[in-house]
Image (cartoon, rainbow, N blue to C red):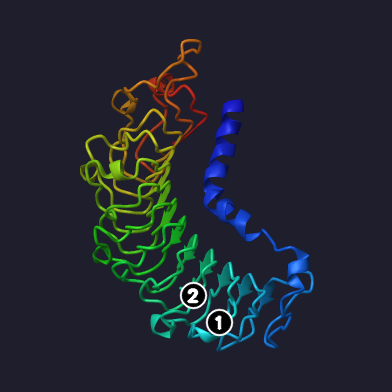
Amino acid sequence: MATTICFIIWVLFITDTVWTRSVRQVYEANDPEDWMMHDFHCPRECFCPPSFPTALYCENRALKAIPAIPSRIWYLYLENNLIETIPEKPFENATQLRWINLNKNKITNYGIEKGALSQLKKLLFLFLEDNELEEVPSPLPRSLEQLQLARNKVSRIPQGTFSNLENLTLLDLQNNKLLDNAFQRDTFKGLKNLMQLNMAKNSLRNMPPRLPANTMQLFLDNNSIEGIPENYFNVIPKVAFLRLNHNKLSDAGLPSSGFNVSSILDLQLSHNQLTKVPKISAHLQHLHLDHNKIKNVNVSVICPTTPITLPAEHDSFSYGPHLRYLRLDGNEIKPPIPMDLMTCFRLLQAVII
């Protein structure tokens, strides 16, 4: 039980890392005495809370243009308006901005003036979800740590778009119009610290090439991916959470070693076309294989053969394969569960058939 609790805490820590790393910096407020030096002008279209002088709330006001942003502002909320353009002028004094939320507007790539975003040298978070973008905007400030572009019409990633974004930890491109031809071998070059990449709900048939080496969370659900190249995970040796639900993966499309990748802790392959349980690493803890075409579980094949290094003072029960959760419902498997499954995976706490 203690081991399980520790694992859950660790998973929550890893999942939130890309947030806490930046949020810690964002919420470092200036000393109140410093605020007295700033102009407390508030655009008439917006609301400036006296208790939060570094925030400017302009959301849900049917705005068609971005107002002039006062120099004291760190947090700018402009979501759910009718804004089509991002010009430079409103931001010329906004040198302290850390956070911009422009979700649910009508912004196009043609509406973004070339230097409007790149001039924001301290910007950490940029939200542009639910707009009309057809390509990833560029140039962007080098300081950026999170870029949220979900639910646009992005089908292109111009060469060099990410070349200077070495601080980016999270890139969300889910629910766009990406095809395989959107990627070149150097598309992600420059993203040295990227940890989470979300490209779910696009139109990919192949795994994206040459992902950043520090990627820990890769989400590719709801595409049309048919196969995974041999040794694909060698370039992302830290990947721990891999989601490939709702694709077209078959047994023939998997590498010979399956998913025998020691870094992967949570593997989700639900709603594919697999007829066999793929090979897995002894380090894997959660495996989702529901709604495939699996008829039986051959434990002699899937039981990890590479032992985990065992300290002399510990027993093999505690240091065998780490699998704790296995989901197999929606297949063609009939109970009972093979006893040798429990013999191999002694830490299993839940098996769903």
Instruction: Between residue 303 and residue 139, name the one nearer to us.
Output: 139
Quarter in which the N terminus is drawn: top right
As helix, strand or loop, the secondary structure at mark 2 comes to: loop
Q: Is residue 42 left or right of residue 133?
A: right
158 lies above or below 115: above
List the residue tagged with mark 1. 92
Residue 166 in percent (x, y) is at: 42, 57
172 lies above or below 327: below
Q: Is residue 89 left or right of residue 37?
A: left
Quarter-of-image position of residue 90: bottom right
* Disc 2 to disc 1: CB gap under 8 Å: yes
Residue 301 in percent (x, y) is at: 28, 26
Quarter-of-image position of residue 12: top right
- Residue type of the residue flagged with mark 1: Glu
Q: Residue at x 41, y 55 (%)?
A: 197
220 lies above or below 318: below
For disc 1, the neighbor class at 10 Å (few under 14, some 14 to 19, many from 20) is some
For disc 2, the neighbor class at 10 Å (few under 14, some 14 to 19, many from 20) is some
- Residue type of the residue flagged with mark 2: Gln
* Distance CA(mark 2)–CA(mark 1): 8 Å
Q: Residue furthest top?
A: 313
Residue 33 in percent (x, y) is at: 78, 67
Q: How many marks?
A: 2
Q: Earlier in the sequence, mark 2 or mark 1?
A: 1
Q: Is residue 1 visible?
A: no
What label sits on residue 213 in the rendered view?
none
What label sits on residue 119 in the rendered view?
2
Q: Is residue 343 left or right of residue 180?
A: right
Q: Residue at x 72, y 80 (%)?
A: 39
259 lies above or below 243: above
Residue 308 in percent (x, y) is at: 40, 22
